Image: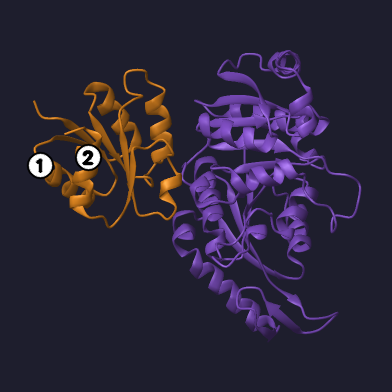
Amino acid sequence: MFKNILLATSATKACDHAARVAFELAARFQSHVAVFHVLGVPSRGFSQMIVDVRTGESVPLDDDYKAWVTEEIKTYYENQIKSHKDTETNVAVGFPHREILRYARDNKTDLIVMGGSTEDPDLSGYKKIMAGTTLQRITKSAQCPVLIVNRPAASFWGGISSIVFGTDFSKASDVSFQYAKKIATSIDDAELHMFHSVDISSPHAGLSLSQEEIEDQLREARAKMRKRYVSQLKGFNNYSIDVWEGLPYVEIVKYAREKQADLIIMSHQARDVSPDKERLGSNMEQVIMRATCPVISINKHTSALNN
Amino acid sequence: MSKKILVVDDDPNIVDYLTSLFEDNGYTVNSASDAQKGLDLANDEPPDLITLDLEMPGDWGPRFYRKLTQIDTLKNIPVIVISGLSSNQYAIQKAAATLTKPFDKDELIKIVKDILME
């Protein structure tokens, strides 16, 4: 299922949860793990001075420094590497999102694992509910699924078997469904919970829709899920379909909690604009930030799924 | 008849400590070193309360809890999470209580008595 896992890490506490999940998955699926760290951004152009992302210091870049950082990363993940031999460690210099995407593309990565925001207690409220720009850019442009572990509690499952697939009935959601199905059918005791939220978050919708209209929408969505997804689950019976009304990201997080999900799979709508500028959809971003389990984000570039 | 507590933890030192602590306070104790053994034991001899570690070989605590709550006869057994992991209070949100290692034994016994309404 996951042959090549790329753990994109800052090798700090903020990525510990992601590392825990990456190595857990790797142990279960006998995957190769590439621990990948972008050590710094050149201070300008072709400068040999870089700003180290871990220390914040400006340092001259040479082979010795790169080798030293590589050893630091290996030491940081010493225990995991000891118990999972099929691990390599690489460092690169540049803008993190570009280097991570490049590495994933060149090495046929089939899952990128990333941590979320830092645990800095000084983070403003704004930053606590916003995904970082590196994470946003990677989830938007990666050619493979991206698994994000934002909260420590999201890394406490020790495996995958209860999968929530969140759909908005878009084409990108169809790709996510195929991926969710692929994972669910490859695990012995998997449960697949398919979920849609009818968005009544707009004050207009909430006030102007009668309860009959809301319930009609719920019924229609359930019928759509049966036709679109259940019809493809031949032979796989351990599934459920649910449609709730509300604010989509809140409902998805609530639903995953209720189902005690250990994985959420969702798509987001990416448009054809510069990867450097695009933001994630707000629902995807909020689910990533708030879920108590890892979230797999799938974009329209994830062509590898169809192979 | 004394109330029964099931201790699910992979650390034998913790298991020994909790077993002695609970037995000294008049409880009967069973223990399991992983989630599957814990479920088997809970099925065979349903306890009145379970203490649960989060990080264990194989399934972690939350998966144990999910499986437990899928069994009608066991789903309402109160669970106390005892773990050294940070943010452990968010791991099993329907847990009756969460304690972080190292914990105070008097506090644990008080929580157990409150939950068991003694």
Name above or below for residue B25 compared with residue A121. Answer: above
Is B97 on the left-hand or right-hand side of A300?
Answer: left
- Here the colouring is by chain
* CB contact under 8 Å: marks 1 and 2: yes
Chain drawn in purple = A
Is B17 on the left-hand or right-hand side of A167?
Answer: left
Identify which amino acid the numbered label 1 is placed on: Asn
Q: Which of the 4 image quadrants contains residue A95?
A: bottom right
- Dot 1 corresponds to which residue? B25
Name above or below for residue A15 compared with residue A48. Answer: above
Is A293 on the left-hand or right-hand side of B36?
Answer: right
Residue A171 in picture, x, y percent from top left:
82, 30
Q: Which of the 4 image quadrants contains residue A237?
A: top right
Residue situated furthest front in the rendering:
A207
Residue A232 in picture, x, y percent from top left:
71, 17
Q: Quadrant of the N terminus of chain A?
A: top right
Which one is in front, A191 or A7?
A191
Residue at (69% x, 32% y) in the render? A179
Which is more N-terminal, label 2 or label 1? 1
Identify which amino acid the numbered label 2 is placed on: Val
Chain drawn in orange = B
Real-space Cα separation, disc 1 to disc 2, in angstroms = 10 Å
Q: Secondary structure at mark 1?
A: loop
Residue A278 in picture, x, y percent from top left:
84, 52
Which one is in front, B69 or A123?
A123
Residue situated furthest bottom in the rendering:
A60
Instruction: Read off the chain for label 2.
Output: B
Instruction: Read off the chain for label 1.
Output: B
Name above or below for residue B84 compared with residue B30. Answer: below
> What label sits on residue A293 in the rendered view?
none
Is B100 on the left-hand or right-hand side of A296?
Answer: left
- Dot 2 corresponds to which residue? B112
